[in-house]
Image (cartoon, helix red, strand yellow):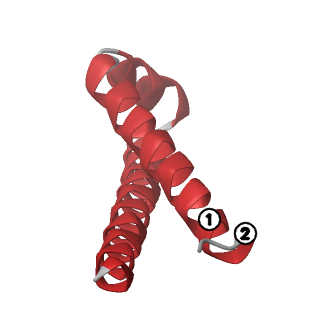
Amino acid sequence: MTTSRETEPRALAEAATLIGLTMVSAVILLPGRLPGWADAYGTALVYLALVEYMAIAAGLMWWGTETLRRADRATRRSDR
């Protein structure tokens, strides 16, 4: 039996994985804008912001996939 407490992290994990993947996709699809932003706002600021942005995206994807993996393992163990 699944309680709402068990489904809540799963829903958040699915959303986090999707958001992280979308964030990474945005960077991959729009690389041409970075030099313009670097000229306008400063190279160091733009590329440090990019590193932070990618770290957040990677963290979301990692947390989401790990949470989903743990939930699936727990479900398999309880089904036995």
* Rendered-image quadrant of the N terminus: bottom right
Q: Residue furthest front?
A: 80
Q: Position of residue 33 (x, y in %)?
A: 39, 17
Q: Residue at x 61, y 71 (%)?
A: 2
Real-space CA distance between mark 2 and mark 1, rounded to the nearest whole angstrom: 5 Å
Residue for badge 1: 7
| Depth order, front residue of 17/72 | 72
Give residue 21's mark.
none
Mark 2 belongs to which amino acid? Answer: Ser
Q: Quadrant of residue 34?
A: top left
Q: Position of residue 25 (x, y in %)?
A: 33, 29
Q: Position of residue 40 (x, y in %)?
A: 52, 24
Say left or right for 57 vs 28: right
Q: Position of residue 8 (x, y in %)?
A: 66, 65
* Rendered-image quadrant of the C terminus: bottom left
| Depth order, front residue of 38/25 | 25
> Where 78 sits versus 11, above or below?
below
> Where 75 sits versus 58, above or below?
below
Q: Quadrant of residue 43?
A: top left
Local secondary structure at mark 1: helix
Q: Residue furthest right?
A: 4
Q: Residue at x 43, y 25 (%)?
A: 39
Q: Residues within 10 Å of mark 1 (few under 14, many from 20)?
A: few
| Depth order, front residue of 42/1 | 1
| Depth order, front residue of 77/17 | 77
Residue for badge 2: 4
Local secondary structure at mark 2: helix
Mark 1 belongs to which amino acid? Answer: Thr
> Where 43 sits versus 27, above or below?
below
Whether tag 2 and tag 1 are in contact, CB under 8 A, the answer is yes
Q: Residues within 10 Å of mark 2 (few under 14, many from 20)?
A: few
